[in-house]
Image (cartoon, rainbow, N blue to C red):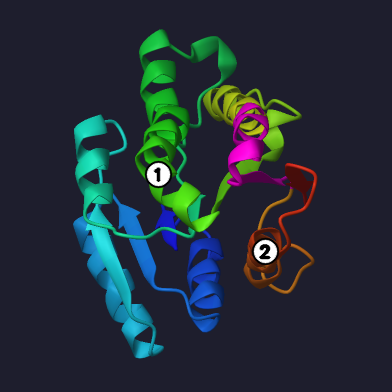
């Protein structure tokens, strides 16, 4: 299993714990080497072995290099997002292009670099979506644009790859991930496993 972006909530941690418990080898990719090292040590304390790889989602060459060293991929989970708290009227073209490169461009590159291996394993791609793709936010206007584009890409890609037996799905998270709630990181991570395990007919799960 390859996870791109651990995220700020505990979701990425719980996804790794779930897939590791099910016997998967884990590759975690992110841009911050120090955070990757800390994550690796924290998982080691839980007797979970992961391999970490630094990746720059703005750089196609960096992405290609990271994936070139992985022989097999059963599931790719793209959990990376550019976060920018900027009102729509203050948003610049430069900001939008930079954020899009991470949230959408990075996903496209990662999937392209994984595709041959995913086809060989009849694997799955699961994208982390957001409620702002359905109900745009004034203050998170850049993310609203990006998540809407990512959602559209997921639907198009899912249809494109159906005949090649690669499943593509997106988890559209409409509520904040909070512990001791219906949207706890554990419960949301279970959705990713259910999607991978069952490959439902629909491409989107909204939670």
Is disc 2 surrounded by few (<14), some (14 to 19) or many (20+) residues within 10 Å?
some
Q: Residues within 10 Å of mark 1 (few under 14, many from 20)?
A: some
Identify the residue position indicated by label 2 in the image.
178
Q: Quadrant of residue 62?
A: top left
Is any part of residue 45 visible from this angle?
Answer: yes
Residue appearing at x 68%, y 31% in the figure: 159
Q: Residue at x 25, y 46 (%)?
A: 55
Question: Which image quarter holds the N terminus?
Answer: bottom left
Residue 21 position within the rendered picture, expressed as x and y whole percent measured from the top left? 53, 83
Q: Is residue 78 visible?
A: no
Q: Which residues are magenta?
A: 156-174
Q: Residue at x 79, y 66 (%)?
A: 182
Where is residue 85 shown, x and y percent of the image? 50, 31
**Mark whose residue sits in front, 2 or 1:** 1
Mark 1 secondary-structure assignment? helix
Q: Is residue 170 magenta?
A: yes
What residue sits right under mark 1 in the picture? 116
55 relative to 196 in the view: left or right? left
């Amino acid at each position: 299993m390859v996870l791109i972006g651990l995220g700020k909530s505990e979701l990425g941690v719980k996804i790794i714990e779930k897939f590791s418990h099910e016997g998967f080898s884990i590759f975690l990719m992110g841009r911050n080497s120090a955070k990757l090292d800390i994550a690796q040590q924290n998982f080691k304390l839980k007797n979970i072995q992961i391999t970490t790889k630094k990746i720059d989602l703005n750089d196609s060459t960096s992405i290609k290099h990271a994936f070139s060293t992985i022989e097999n991929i059963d599931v790719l989970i793209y959990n990376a997002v550019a976060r920018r708290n900027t009102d729509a009227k203050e948003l610049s073209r430069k900001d939008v292009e930079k954020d899009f490169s991470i949230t959408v461009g990075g996903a496209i590159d990662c999937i392209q670099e994984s595709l041959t291996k995913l086809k060989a394993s009849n694997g799955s791609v699961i994208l982390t979506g957001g409620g702002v793709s359905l109900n745009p936010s004034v203050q998170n206007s850049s993310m609203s644009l990006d998540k809407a584009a990512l959602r559209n890409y997921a639907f198009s890609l899912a249809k494109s790859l159906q005949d090649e037996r690669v499943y593509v799905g997106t988890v559209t998270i409409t509520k904040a991930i909070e512990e001791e709630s219906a949207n706890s990181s554990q419960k949301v991570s279970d959705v990713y496993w259910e999607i991978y395990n069952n490959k439902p007919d629909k491409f989107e799960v909204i939670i």
